Amino acid sequence: MSDLSIKHLLGIRGMTRDDIETIFSTAAEFKEVLNRPIKKVPSLRDTTVANLFFENSTRTRLSFELAQKRLSADVVNFSAASSSVKKGETLVDTVNNILAMKVDMVVMRHPHPGAPHFLANKVNTTFVNAGDGTHEHPTQALLDSFSIREKLGNDLEGKKIAIVGDIRHSRVALSNILALKLQGATVRVCGPATLIPKHMASLGVEVSHDLDDTLAWADVANMLRIQLERQGDDDAIRFFPSIREYTMNFGLTTERLNRLDKELVILHPGPINRGVEISSEIADSDQAIILNQVENGVATRMAIMYLLANR
Amino acid sequence: MESQVLINEEQFALILDRLAHQLLEHHDFSDTDLVGLQPRGTRVAQRLSSRLSKLLGGKEVRCGALDVTFHRDDLRMRDKPIAPQENKMEFLVEGRKVILVDDVLFTGRTIRAGLDALLAYGRPTKVELAVLIDRRFKRELPIEPTYIGQQIDSISDQHVVVEWSEENDSDRVILFNAKPE
């Protein structure tokens, strides 16, 4: 028997280390399923899942949908662009209407931080947070940790992990910090001062504005995407002067990596801005485990939905 | 708690020897694989596989470990999810004969899940079932074993536990009158 202490996956906050271990040991078995000739198991064949995406997403949504199909769940998809949200319906009403059609689990992405937490209190179903604004993205953090552990051995205790880039706008950063700390890793965030929130150190992480120094320190570098769409309007004051300057100071370039005389494990949550936060060469190199992350994403999400079903 | 030893260590070894010989009567293991159901059937399958290898003069008998957790039909009826076990199937069974192996056959539901799980590795030409203990009269599905170690008549409240020398003092089978802690 295995059990999670949580009823919903709203964020890494609220989870225990045991929860993470349970999810990872289950995910390892699902990863084996995904490498079989027939990649499907009937575990959730009597479960219906609704994917509610109030914000655009390609890979997360695809990954969730594949995970659901591999588990034999019935899937309905919903995107805000084509919905009655545009006609002025409230969030609770939209979700309740979908649940009235007998849906057992909701996977939701929403542009507002806390939206799934709000709904989990109002609506009686199981929620999985697929990203809420700039707050949390727990499944991404879990698949990142799973991928790092696959590479570094199954223990993160004392491992040094750097998260580089746009920390301010990143839900991946917050979830990753919480998940890594829970597993005993040391975390350092690195980026321009404008892209790191003021009270970052209160999360128990180190803060640096020097990428070379951070890379020399780290075992793992998680290169976040520069969220060009969240840098304000064209005429607003920017968080950094130009893309070129950002790349010079905080881009993972081949020269920079060659200066280190060690192997670094490199992650990127995608989609990659090639030549901005990471050079094309490095993204395609053996040190980058970007495609492993994508593969592990399906296995991790299968484990989460398997463990949360019928809660 | 009230319990009785149904099969002691000597009987246990004799039963495994007999099962191995019975399997050899029907298979030369050129196109036959053993597949143990995780976690406890795997033990039986491994013991049988090493006995068969010895009897066949060192020839390797392939032995897989199949986990049926994700194929069970009672997943939704339980309060807690079941923890999956490792699945070690390093070969495909397409066009092969397969002997499914489990320790105790009771309702037959695990075997049904096993048949389902096996399909992910191809279509075997024939599937047979070997069990160490057959608790007859308790079947909920039309599933019967091909090779039986020992048949036991027991009531539903009783529990049959197979102990292995790897974890306990010796190989033996015990009948408990209530669910063991």
Image (tube, rainbow, N blue to C red):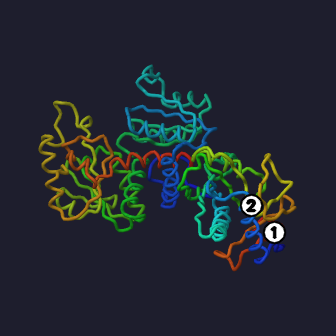
Q: Which residue is mark 1?
A: B175
* Closer mark to the observer between disc 1 and disc 2: 2
- In the image, A303 versus B170, the foreground residue is B170
> In the current view of this chain or complex, which residue is farthest to the bottom?
B169
Q: Is residue A194 above or below residue B174?
A: above
- In the image, B53 versus A65, the foreground residue is B53
Q: What residue appears at the point 33 percent right and 61 percent down from the top-left corner?
A: A204
Q: Relative to A255, is A266 on the left or the right? A: right
- In the image, A291 versus A79, the foreground residue is A291
Q: What residue appears at the point 64 percent right and 75 percent down from the top-left corner?
A: B166
Picture disc at residue A66: none
> Where is residue A183, by image quadrant?
bottom left
Q: Relative to A76, is B39 on the left or the right? A: right
- In percent of width and height, residue B86 lies at 56, 59
Image quarter (top left, top right, bottom left or bottom right) of the N terminus of chain A = bottom right
The chain letter under disc 2 is B
Q: Earlier in the sequence, mark 1 or mark 2?
A: 2
Q: Which residue is mark 2?
A: B25
- In percent of width and height, residue A130 lies at 44, 41
- In percent of width and height, residue A43 lies at 61, 44
Q: Are marks 1 and 2 in contact (CB under 8 Å)?
A: no
Q: Is residue B21 above or below residue A61?
A: below
Give the CA distance from mark 1 to mark 2. 31 Å
Q: What residue appears at the point 33 percent right and 64 percent down from the top-left corner?
A: A186
Label 1: state its secondary structure.
Answer: strand
What kind of residue is marked 2? Answer: Glu
- In percent of width and height, residue B37 lies at 65, 57
What kind of residue is marked 1? Answer: Leu
Label 2: state its secondary structure.
Answer: helix
> Where is residue A75, by image quadrant?
top right
> Where is residue B174, by image quadrant?
bottom right
